[in-house]
Image (spheres, helix red, strand yellow):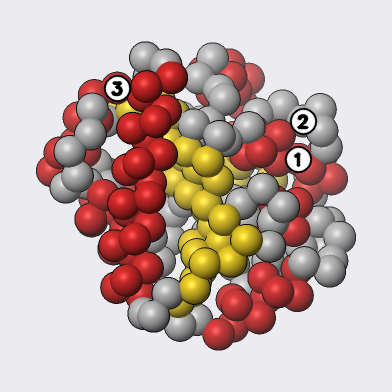
C-alpha cells in the first residue's frame, strides 16, 4: 500500500488538492476533456473547498460521483447535491456534473441509459475515493447483493447495489471503471479508518472491497 501520512488534516487537504489539480492539468494535456471521479460524504469537503478555487480549465472537466444514493438531487443525502454545494463552486462552477441519478422509482429502470452515458466518457482520468470503516469504497459494500458482479473484470461501468447496512438502493461505479483511472487516490482520516485500511490489505475484496484498489491507489491519511 502506498500510504502518504500528513501532520494534520489541514496539511492533508492542502497537499491533496494541489496533487489533484496537477493530475487534472496533465489529463487535460492528454485529451480535450478530463473525467474527474469524486466521492460523497463529509471528509472530502475541505479538499473540494480548496480545489474549487484553483485555476484550471474547469469548463473542460466532467465531474462524476463514484456512487449515488437513489434520492433526488435536492435530498440532503444526494452526492450530486453535495458536489454542487462543495466542489462546483467558484472557479469550478464551470465544470460539468455527470449525475448517476435520473427520475425513476428504481435505479434499474434507468441503469441502461446511465451506463451508456458514463461509458462514453471513460476512462477516468483522476479519481478521488473515500472508504468507510467497513472497508467499502464507492457503493461496493461487503454483503452487497451485486458485489461479486461489481468486482468482476468484465463488469459494466455501473451497477445497482443494495446492502443491509444502507437504507436506500445505490448505483455505483464498478471495479473496472474505478481501476481505469490514470491517477487514483483514497482519502481517509482518523485512527479507525487507518486500522481498517491496514486490515484490508490482508483480506479478500469480497470482505474488504477497498482491497481491490490498494495496489494501484495512493492512500492519503491524517489523524
Residue carrying label 1: 150
Q: Which tag, 1 or 2, sits closer to the chain's start?
A: 1
Q: Position of residue 76 (x, y in %)?
A: 34, 57
Residue ID at (37%, 68%):
12
Residue 13 image offset from top left, x and y in percent: 33, 64
Q: Residue 190, labelled with which disc?
A: none
Q: Is residue 41 visible?
A: yes
- Viewer-proximal residue, 179 or 15? 15
Q: Nearer the viewer, mark 3 or mark 2?
A: 3
Q: Which residue is mark 2?
A: 155
Using the numbered discs, state the Cα–Cα distance from disc 1 to disc 2 in whole angstroms.
6 Å
Calculate the distance from the C-alpha at mark 1 to the C-alpha at mark 3. 29 Å
Look at the picture and state if 52 lies above or below 222: above
Q: Say which residue label 3 marks.
A: 60
Q: Position of residue 52 (x, y in %)?
A: 22, 46
**Is residue 85 rendered to the left or right of residue 156?**
left
Callout 1: few (<14), some (14-19), or many (20+) C-alpha neighbours within 10 Å? many
Residues under labels 3 and 2: Cα distance? 28 Å
Helix, strand or loop at label 3? It is helix
At x 69% / y 56%, what residue is drawn? 214
The residue carrying pointer 2 sits among few (fewer than 14), some (14 to 19) or many (20 or more) residues within 10 Å by Cα, namely some
Residue drawn at x 55%, y 46% is 184
Q: In the structure shown, which secondary structural element does the residue marked by tag 2 occupy?
A: loop
What residue is at 52 percent from the left and 52 percent from the top? 185
Q: How many marks?
A: 3
State yes or no: discs 1 and 2 in contact (Cβ < 8 Å).
yes
Amino acid at each position: 500500500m502506498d500510504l502518504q501520512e500528513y501532520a494534520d488534516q489541514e496539511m492533508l487537504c492542502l497537499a491533496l488538492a494541489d496533487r489533484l489539480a496537477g493530475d487534472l492539468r496533465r489529463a487535460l494535456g492528454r485529451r480535450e476533456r478530463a473525467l474527474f471521479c469524486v466521492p460523497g460524504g463529509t471528509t472530502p469537503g475541505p479538499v473540494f473547498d480548496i480545489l474549487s478555487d484553483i485555476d484550471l480549465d474547469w469548463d473542460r472537466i466532467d465531474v462524476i460521483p463514484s456512487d449515488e444514493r437513489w434520492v433526488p438531487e435536492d435530498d440532503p443525502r444526494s452526492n450530486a447535491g453535495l458536489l454542487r454545494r462543495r466542489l462546483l463552486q467558484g472557479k469550478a462552477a464551470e465544470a460539468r456534473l455527470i449525475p448517476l441519478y435520473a427520475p425513476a422509482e428504481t435505479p434499474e429502470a434507468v441503469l441502461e441509459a446511465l451506463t451508456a452515458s458514463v461509458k462514453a466518457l471513460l476512462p477516468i482520468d483522476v479519481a478521488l475515493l473515500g472508504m468507510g470503516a467497513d472497508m467499502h469504497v464507492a457503493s461496493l459494500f461487503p454483503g452487497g447483493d451485486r458485489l461479486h458482479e461489481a468486482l468482476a473484470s468484465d463488469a459494466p461501468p455501473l451497477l445497482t447495489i443494495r446492502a443491509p447496512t444502507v437504507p436506500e438502493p445505490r448505483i455505483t461505479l464498478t471495479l473496472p471503471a474505478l481501476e481505469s483511472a490514470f491517477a487514483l487516490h483514497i482519502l481517509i482520516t482518523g485512527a479507525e479508518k487507518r486500522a481498517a485500511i491496514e486490515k484490508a490489505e490482508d483480506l479478500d475484496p469480497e470482505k474488504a472491497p477497498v482491497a481491490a484498489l490498494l495496489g494501484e491507489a495512493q492512500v492519503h491519511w491524517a489523524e
